[in-house]
Amino acid sequence: MDSEVTTASTLVILPWSFKVFYSILSDCVPLWGYRRKVWMLVGWAMCLTMLIVMAASPAGDPYYTVPSDRGIDPADYTPEIEARINFDAGSQAGKYVMLMLFAAIGYVLVDREPVEKRGTIQSAIYAVRTVFVIIGQLLVGFCFNSEAYGGQFDFSLNFPLLMTIVAVITAPIIPITWFFIKEEKQSKVSFRKYMSELWNLIQKRAVYQNVFSNISYTASSPVQSYKVGVTPINNTISEIISNVLFMGGIMATSKWGMHWSWRKMILCTGIFVILADGITTFLTIWNLFRSQ
């Protein structure tokens, strides 16, 4: 099941990797003369539709029909444990993974800002976005921390109800986008010119090195589950702390660091992340200390 969880997690965040293609689509293929607003409506409508479908779909039986089996290493499974595990859960979850993939595509598609202000309000966008990410993490962390989800609480929501909540929050965004986003009709951008400029940008070292720097490993979930025994609530707290630090760094940079050397910023933050992450990672790898 670990491979299914890893695959699902990767597919859900995959649309972020295609942001450049969404930009090409909106710039080179304007709808009714609008390069932003209509595409934003398409994105929100796609996202809302996927959420409604997931809210109306039955969640299915969990992989661990007995929650206590979650903490047992697969190598130690007995025939009795194997008999009560729902090995078909992965195939049942495939539908939700694809729906969440398209919901994420719709969400990322609307990630736009006015051309004349592009870059100047990026820090404010990320700060606001991070606040709502933290709210979502609190919702998932506290409402999906029952024994069935590997936690310790005696209450929890179910997945369709969570999708219903998110759909209700998302629905007002569609009329808000139409009435409050102001945009003048524009002609489409030449596709050949756009691709030429994109190719020149990709060849810059600051761009292609950053692309390769995002390559990582996919074994974090099994390590957390079997080696460290992380519960959902503690994982959520860790992610919230990370997002608070990220938001603080973004806001501090926008206020005092607009003229800082980006090379020195990358160097200093890179060293800090390597030290902070490396200490805990190697303590776990070498089994010096394995505890959440």
Image (cartoon, rainbow, N blue to C red):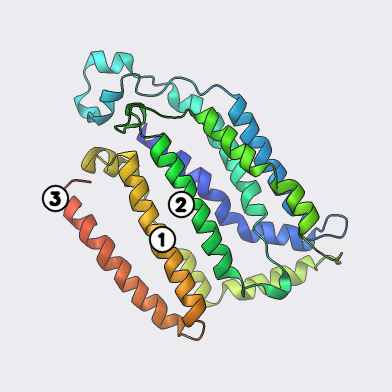
Q: Amino acid at mark 3?
A: Phe
Q: Residue 289 — which label?
A: 3
Three-letter amino acid code at the position of disc 2: Ile
Foreground mark, 1 or 3, reads 1
Dividing the picture into quadrants, the one containing residue 196 is bottom right
Q: Residue at x 44, y 46 (%)?
A: 137
Q: Which residue is mark 1?
A: 244
Q: Residues within 10 Å of mark 3 (few under 14, many from 20)?
A: few
Identify whether 82 is placed above or below 227: above
5, 261: nearer the viewer: 261
Q: Taking 136 as reference, is 251 above or below it?
A: below
Q: Is residue 21 left or right of residue 72?
A: right
Which of the 4 quarters of the picture holds residue 2? top left
Of residues 92 and 191, the one drawn nearer to the viewer in this rendering: 92
Where in the figure is residue 66, as x and y percent of width and height? Answer: 31, 19
Q: Who comes first in sequence, dot 3 or dot 2?
A: 2
Q: Secondary structure at mark 1?
A: helix
Tag 1: residue type?
Val
- The span from disc 1 to disc 3 (Cα, nearest Å) is 26 Å
In the rendered structure, are the residues bearing label 1 and label 2 in contact, judged by CB atoms less than 8 Å apart? yes
Residue on which disc 2 sits: 134
Q: Are marks 1 and 3 in contact (CB under 8 Å)?
A: no
Q: Which comes sooner in the sequence, label 1 or label 3?
A: 1
How far apart are the alpha carbons under marks 1 and 2?
Answer: 8 Å
Give the side of residue 159 with respect to residue 156, left or right: right
Front residue of 132/218: it is 132
> Is the N terminus in the top left, top right, bottom left or bottom right quadrant?
top left
Q: Is residue 39 left or right of residue 101?
A: right
Outermost residue to the left:
288
